[in-house]
Image (spheres, coloured by chain):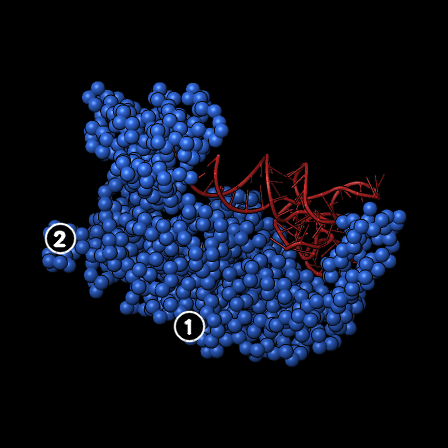
Amino acid sequence: MTDHQPQPTNTQPINISEPRSERYNPHAIEAKWQQQWAADGLYTFDPNAPGEKFYALTMFPYPSGNLHIGHWYSYCAPDARARFLRMNGRNVLFPMGFDSFGLPAENAAIKNNLDPRAWTYSNIEYMTGQFQRMGTMIDWSRKFATSDPEYYRWNQWFFTEMFKRGLAYKRDGLVNWCPKDQTVLANEQVVNGHCERCGTQVERRNLSQWYLKITDYADELLDFGGTDMPERVRAMQTHWIGKSVGAEVVFDTPAGPETVFTTRPDTLMGATFLVLAPEHAKVAELTTPEQAEEVRAYLEVSGGKTDVERQQSAEKTGVFTGSFATHPIGGHQIPIWVADYVLVSYGTGSIMAVPAHDERDFEFARKFGLDIKEVIRPEGGEPLDVSGNEAYSGEGVIVNSGEFDGLPGGKASIATVIAKLEERGVAKAKTTFRLRDWLVSRQRYWGTPIPIVYCPEHGAQAVPADQLPVLLPGNVHFTPTGQSPLKQDAEFRKATCPVCGGEAERDTDTMDTFVDSSWYMYRFTSPHFDTGPWDPALADKLMPIDLYTGGIEHAILHLLYSRFWIKVARDMQLTDISEPFKVLRNQGIILGPDNEKMSKSRGNVIDPDDLVREYGADVVRTYLAFIAPWEVGGPWDPSGINGPAKWLGRVWSLFFDEIKGPAETVSESDLRYAVHSTLKKITGDFERLSFNTIVAALMELTNTLVKAKRSPVAHTPAWAEALNVFNLMLAPLVPHIAEELWHERGQASSVHLQSWPAVDEAAAVRDSVVIGVQVSGKVRGEVEISKTASQAEAIAAARANPDVAKHLDGKQLVKEVYVPGRIINIVVR
RNA sequence: GCCGGAGUGGCGGAAUGGCAGACGCACUUGACUCAAAAUCAAGCGGGAAACCGUGUGGGUUCGACUCCCAUCUCCGGCACCA
């Protein structure tokens, strides 16, 4: 099978040859078709096939060993959408792989004395089988795992290229260390002071680590043009990047000039003291002998605190250094304090405190009896009560500031104020970001080795491209301490300097696994390319991803890193686009029946393999589409799956059984209306990812078809058309039963190679409509009228309705409203 | 505190200015059965009714779950970022 393009629908009526007496049995048909599709290469993607390309991707899984129900939820609906688009003539790339580096493999290895590689690859094999049992249209010929040397080789290549461009660098600094995972973490991987992976409270350590310069792209990452992401994802990324526009102001101190960052340079005259973070480099020099003991004691206490403890302390703490700074405008002396409410990692690690107009400074000044000087007054308001309970942090009007008096405060005059301060040489405009560079080195084994060697003569050197990949050694020895075996591996550590050829020492750290997922979407375009990370011609043709789906938990991690990575690749001329995802959507989360997050310890886990054994994959797919709006999710209702199970049973008997029950009178136009209005609705619902309403509409149509089968219309061409269109509409959602019905109805080719049926617009609307009649906005009855009825005809028909007439009796007419096909409203007084 | 989202039957939800509760679950009744399951059929917001009903209070409109203002609650994210 080489032709994967949709073929024109056969519109000839096709009758079922033989009624089948057996009931719907998914097990008999699902495995059969999965094998047949694989044998036919039905889902193999050909980039040169006709049709506009559509790249659909769902975030690839970590090979933990099992696909859980959440995986099914995230993959089934996008699979249905991909199948729908394929039937609509798009050339759809829908690949899958495995994000296979990471700690679980290593932890399993340490705990059970296994080989992480063997553990990982056997999991991949098992999970691939699960994907196939789901009935997806994934093109498995493009599968890869990020732990394949053919893949991580290019992680290393990118790293060395970034190193050459100054985008990858090593430096000392205060970092987050997870004591359980025995590695450092990036800022993005610390949530409320805890390790994002394992939940352990992180420690602060001073270590030399590798960073990628994502801050170079901070401003560009704030521009979401060219990528359609949900508002909350944009909001989270924007906040994470945290752009603040303001000024740097220089204060003279006994330890030399000290620069502080402020977003309110207009409050400079209100600065009554400076505060340094405890880790600030100048603290020691500024501490006077009289204050030495007090400062030392404070640093000890504060240094032992975690970030969380610092933030949780109810009261501000701090200590006077004994030194004073010179106010750059007033020329007077203001005290310099040390306090841990100032963060060393933001701005310059020091602030000018304006207690009158900043809540934090206010609280600190009140506690330690420091001066509070009002320089901003609310518009038309009273002077600030410095003995009151709060600062005024609004914009207001500048006062007590000499030449600035009378200017509006805040944003309105920030440029003017900065310009005047610049003239005096005490300040300059400055934009600060909250975003920090991405810490990418990890003290772990199961990851991409960092391709750097250290030469005693030439320092850190990138491993030359022709020596990549630096292979991760196998047969390593794990110690229970959790330390990376690479550190103990003398063979691995031995290297030669690419500059002098002398003995050098290899870096024993590996890369953050978020590196792996930052560019994997490109690799699917040319998974076996071996002269670069991807084939530029294919990438240009297939990227960006038209619809990227996955969980919201990656809103700032994977998605931000990936956007950064692709911008770097663009600057390296490897791609011509700046954003990897054209559209991003997040599916919701399926909770346990108890409305809690599923977990083994809670015992509320729903196993998809069990469900498939009991109901078949098509039923599970349907229930997952039906259970909730796809982008919302919700608790698993164990009895809810009965609905889809009964429905597919009814679909089966609709095609094969005599329908028992009273004779019905469904007209040909009723039948065609039901079919084509449903077709029109679900075509739109597929576009807007409204999968639950697709299922509802198909169920509703089934109810109509069941009735129709008991009426004379079942012997007309309209009936054959109805079954044909219905069969095609089933294909994206329930691919196995749709294929079985298609073949039972005498078709030789796959239902999945057919074109999506065309809506007969004339049939999709009714000639006559039943519309509601309101009297003064209240519904009083309904009338059946022609859809082309004039207003006069419609109103006359409405007035003829006794329930309506009753409410019109003796009232004075105010207005008559007629919206064809919608409503009649007769307003009376 | 700031940012984002959501409040509709017993439950999941539908309806993007036009008959609120589609579709389904659960439940009730009936048919079939010795019986049960499965299946089929009927019912299922409240109220005796007039009517009342989409968190609450206002507003716009002939008409509001839907738009505007205010407010409450819940969920998610961030949180001493100067």
Q: Residue at x 21, y 23 (%)?
A: A288
A561 with respect to A451 (left or right):
right
Question: B72 or B70: nearer the eye?
Answer: B70
Look at the numbered disc 1 and give the secondary structure of its residue: loop
* Chain of the residue displaying label 2: A
Reading the image, the residue beneath label 2 is: A458
Does residue A98 show up? Answer: no
Chain A drawn in what color?
blue
Q: In the picture shown, does residue A23 fall above or below A430?
A: below
In space, the residues marked 1 and 2 are separated at their CA atoms by: 46 Å
Q: Residue at x 28, y 28 (%)?
A: A327
In the image, residue A529 sits, relative to residue A239, either above or below, namely: below
Nearest the viewer among A489 and A816 is A816
Please tell me whether mark 2 sits on a helix, a strand or a loop: loop
Q: Position of residue A598 (x, y in %)?
A: 50, 47
Residue A253, position as x, y percentages in the image: 23, 29
Tell me: A257 left or right of A113.
Answer: left
